[in-house]
Amino acid sequence: MPITIQLVRPAEVDQLLALSRKTFYDAFEHLNNPEDFEAYTSKAFTREQLLSEIENPDSAFYFAVMDGEPVGYIKLNYRNAQAEFRDPAGVEISRIYVHADHQGKKIGNRLLDFAINKATDDKLQYIWLGVWEHNLDAQRFYERNGFVKSGSHEFVVGKDVQTDFLMKRTLA
């Protein structure tokens, strides 16, 4: 099925909120302490928080759309919106998620390719992301796509201080 990548507009914040919560809960709820998880998601996934991120000129969300419905999304952070580096020569993939019902359809690959192509078109030098140290499948996915581990940083879920590996891909 054809997949299109579309910029998320402020008017689509409710669709983004529903997809963000669903995909994040499916991926990580069962792996975290319920109180910590709720403390994190109750702040990170609110309408107001996502709207402020959509309206940030240094961030951009894109839906992966199939049959007219968003089935995944990616968030790109530039300059001061980046969690680390804040380097105008790089871009951070802050989030990349695909609805569980659509896993295995190469949607994640399409979103990643979109980000890499956009960064290349924008003449950026590298693209990077943080991936949870326990998310081995995601680490392998990024390694297959040319990313290498280049450090780590803390990612706090409630009171639980977790470690994300920083992975980077240099662009030609």
Image: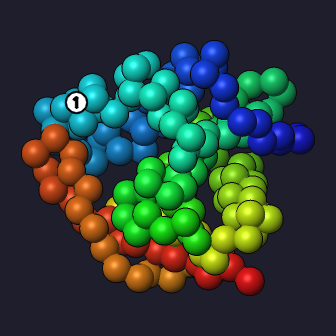
Q: Residues within 10 Å of mark 1 (few under 14, many from 20)?
A: some
Residue found at x 83% / y 27%? 67
**Where residue 40 sits: x, y (%)?**
24, 36
- Whether 7 is drawn above or below 97: the answer is above
Q: Quadrant of residue 110?
A: bottom right
Please give left or right for residue 48 compared with residue 35 in the image.
right
Judge by depth and name the residue closer to the eye, 84 or 159.
84
- Whether 165 is drawn above or below 104: the answer is below
Please give left or right for residue 148 compared with residue 126 in the image.
left
Residue 45 showing in the rendered view: yes
Judge by depth and name the residue closer to the eye, 50 or 35.
50
Q: Quadrant of residue 65?
A: top right
**Where residue 38 sits: x, y (%)?**
22, 30
Judge by depth and name the residue closer to the eye, 92 or 152.
92
Residue 138 showing in the rendered view: no
Write down the residue under mark 1: 38
| Residue most extreme to the right | 2
Q: Quadrant of the N terminus?
A: top right
Q: Secondary structure at mark 1?
A: helix
- The kind of residue on which mark 1 rests is Glu
